[in-house]
Image (cartoon, helix red, strand yellow):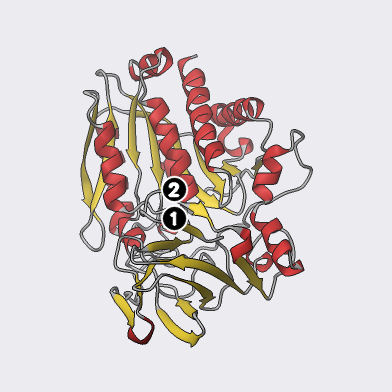
């Protein structure tokens, strides 16, 4: 294996390696710095053209015409080599260069695809699928890093470009940054849970492009204590969604613990906070060109307003929110609670929860970075606490955390939360 390839494969799979190490690592991803206060008034967005690129001379076709598709241009370089261009919805933008496209050929062959980005680097290791639902990482023998970065974490550690070799035929092959969970697939998941008589789902608002803001309500009585959960404010953050999915499936399950939880608490879930951004294949923003997790102070965007109005309505009905979680993804697993010096005893449940999860899952070190800044509220966690008295946390999962561990972590997190709430 070439040295450049070895360096990048090490970077990509560091989460997998850490998962095998039974001792907590001393140093790891230390989290993001303080978020800058920015305007959340809408900005122009370059809406992506969606369709099929037909390279007639090669009998080869590329398409981004599906939910979460992102492909902005392609060139044929000869000798079955192709360069694709991935650009963001607008700038400045977080360095999360999402891509997702299909490729097929009338004549089966092996092609090489070079991934290029607009003022960014190759953050996400390519995934491949034949059905758009079941994905696996591209085999390392078919992967090449170009112009490697330096360091362990962050965009500077990633290569500038990557090349992958793909076998293509008449049936389309999906090539994506992460697994595909567009609004249709997420709604199908919500509907599958809603066959239980204590689960309902309904619209609480609309996105900028008039997609439904769907909320799932889990209620088995007339009690007025509730847990609030949201996910996918940022479109590429699929690992956070996968952990949230397991978390919700455990809370809504049929175990004695889950039944007792539902006998005492309601659960409200917005699994897809940014349906426009997800379906348009955006890197970070909604179709107002804004990072939604900076809009929990001014509420200039319809997506955040929908949740704000829902929470105000429920409080008016007498609800007390006892816990809030916002699931995200980043370079490695990390918790962002509110510092105990700010939240005091009310935040004990959050820190006890983190401690209990860690005891149950010692094989994967997770950093903790408490925040001492709660105003302006700006981010969901701060708004949940300041405006609704809700102990809350941003729960981040690594881009490359193994998928079976994501499912386990979501399950354990739900079980430990139920134990603490039912005390």
For image coordinates 26% across by 57% down, the residue present is: 207
For image coordinates 72% across by 69% down, the residue present is: 4
Image coordinates of residue 238 in percent, x first then y, are: 45, 51
Q: Would you identify the image quadrant in which residue 76 lies?
A: bottom left
Image coordinates of residue 416 in percent, x first then y, are: 53, 23
Earlier in the chain: of badge 1 and badge 2, it is 1
Residue 380 circle label: 2
Front residue (pair 368, 199): 199
Q: Is residue 72 left or right of residue 184?
A: right
Q: CA distance from mark 1 to mark 2?
A: 6 Å
Image coordinates of residue 149 in percent, x first then y, are: 70, 70
**Circle 1 sits on which residue?**
293
Does any portion of residue 389 appear in the rendered image?
no
Hey, which residue is sitting farthest right in the picture? 26
Q: Is residue 76 above or below residue 194?
A: below
Does any portion of residue 219 appear in the rendered image?
yes
Crowd around label 1: few <14 · some 14–19 · many ≥20 (10 Å): many
């Amino acid at each position: 294996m070439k040295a450049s390839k070895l360096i990048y494969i090490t970077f990509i799979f560091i989460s997998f390696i850490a998962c095998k190490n039974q001792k907590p690592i001393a140093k790891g991803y230390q989290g993001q710095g303080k978020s800058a206060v920015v305007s959340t008034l809408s900005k122009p967005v370059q809406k992506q053209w969606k369709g099929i690129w037909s390279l007639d001379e090669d009998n080869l076709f590329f398409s981004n015409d599906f939910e979460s598709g992102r492909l902005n241009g392609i060139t044929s370089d000869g000798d079955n080599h192709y360069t694709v261009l991935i650009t963001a919805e607008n700038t400045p933008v977080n360095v999360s260069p999402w891509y997702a496209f299909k490729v097929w050929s009338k004549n089966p062959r092996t092609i090489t695809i070079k991934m290029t980005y607009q003022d960014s680097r190759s953050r996400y290791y390519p995934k491949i699928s034949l059905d758009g639902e079941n994905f696996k990482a591209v085999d390392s023998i078919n992967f090449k890093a170009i112009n490697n970065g330096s360091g362990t974490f962050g965009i500077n550690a990633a290569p500038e470009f990557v090349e992958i070799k793909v076998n293509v035929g008449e049936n389309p092959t999906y090539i994506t940054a992460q697994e595909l969970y567009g609004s249709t697939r997420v709604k199908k998941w919500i509907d599958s849970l809603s066959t239980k008589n204590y689960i309902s789902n309904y619209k609480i608002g609309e996105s900028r492009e008039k997609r439904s803001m769907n909320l799932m309500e889990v209620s088995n009585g007339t009690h007025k204590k509730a847990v609030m959960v949201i996910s996918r404010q940022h479109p590429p953050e699929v690992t956070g969604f996968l952990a949230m999915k397991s978390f919700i499936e455990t809370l809504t399950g049929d175990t004695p613990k889950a039944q007792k939880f539902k006998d005492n608490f309601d659960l409200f879930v917005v699994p897809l906070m940014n349906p426009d951004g997800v379906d348009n294949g955006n890197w970070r923003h909604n179709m107002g060109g804004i990072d939604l997790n900076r809009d929990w102070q001014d509420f200039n965007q319809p997506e955040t307003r929908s949740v704000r109005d829902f929470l105000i309505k429920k409080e008016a009905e007498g609800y007390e929110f006892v816990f809030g979680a916002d699931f995200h993804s980043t370079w490695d697993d990390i918790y962002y609670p509110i510092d105990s010096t700010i939240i005091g005893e009310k935040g004990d449940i959050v820190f006890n929860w983190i401690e209990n999860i860690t005891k149950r899952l010692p094989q994967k070190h997770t950093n903790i970075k408490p925040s001492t800044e709660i105003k302006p509220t700006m981010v969901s966690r701060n708004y949940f606490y300041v405006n609704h008295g809700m102990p809350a946390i941003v729960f981040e999962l690594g881009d490359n955390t193994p998928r079976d561990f994501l499912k386990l972590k979501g399950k354990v997190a739900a079980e430990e939360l139920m134990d603490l709430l039912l005390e």
